Image: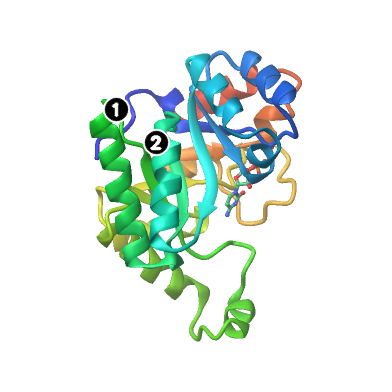
Amino acid sequence: MTLPPSPSERLIVALDVKNRQDALGLIERLPGASIFKVGLELFTAEGPGLLREIGASGKKVFLDLKLHDIPNTVAQAVRAGAGLGVRMMTLHASGGREMMARAAEAAAQVSAKERIPRPLLLGVTVLTSLGDDDLGELGLSGNAQAHVLRLARLACQAGLDGIVSSAREIKAVRRETGKDALIVTPGIRPAWAASDDQKRIMTPAEAIRAGADFLVIGRPVIRAADPQEAFDKILEEIA
Ligand code: C5P
């Protein structure tokens, strides 16, 4: 897997806003950003029309819906996302090998048929909101990190392009998946930004050094008085 060509394509801005107007306003204030993450809240509120609008403005979409369903349903959702020109999508690795393999197959088929770039599929392992006790309650023994690594390996074996990994786990995930997997990391805080509710944070430079290919950053950019200036400062740090 080749790395994105420029540092600005490695910095994904999380569009954690409530509606289309706020999302498009933010994109307008960030002319230097090229990939925007649309999550469950915004997608549920505004639907695929917003994804088309973002695409039409020349920006790429990372659709973070963390799909988890039977293989056929997930494959069809990936097909729909690929058809919308989405550049990256997430799915839960705990959906199992067949679910992920069928999703990868669907993404490849749509891109070949429509002659569009194949969306990159990223596995979500264990949600960072879950600790060892929560996993125990779900009947999963062993610690969270062991599950993260097992699911990361399975996701790559099943044909996904990479993994969403917390900053703290980048190195271990990289060891598990090898150099070709893409690692996408949220929980990034430049030294000058507030940590907000993120606990296990890393600076952009630290995360890149640890082996992340893409960084996801929200509040330090989208809540800045000048989002483009904040984005540029982070770019400088990782360039
Ligand atoms: O504002 P902030 O930079 O903390 O936003 C990070 C983004 O990454 C949010 O959209 C958040 O939902 C997402 N995310 C995260 N931690 C995870 C997975 C996703 O912060 N483990």
Query: In the rendered view, would you say 3 is above or below 149?
Result: above
Look at the numbered discs 2 and 1 and tell me whether their residues touch, using CB distance below 8 Å: yes
| Coloring applied to the structure | rainbow
Residue located 63% across and 38% down the image:
43
**Residue type pointed to by label 1:** Glu
Q: Give the quarter of the image for residue 38.
A: top right
* Secondary structure of residue under mark 2: helix
Q: Which numbered dot is residue 82?
A: 2
Residue located 43% across and 75% down the image:
146
Q: Which of pointers 2 and 1 lies earlier in the amino acid sequence?
A: 2
Marks 2/1: CA–CA distance: 9 Å
**Residue 200 relative to residue 101: left or right:** right
Residue toward you, 44 or 227: 44
**Residue 57 relative to residue 46: left or right:** left
Tell me the residue that label 1 is attached to.
114
Density class for disc 2 (Cα within 10 Å; few <14, some 14-19, many ≥20) is: many
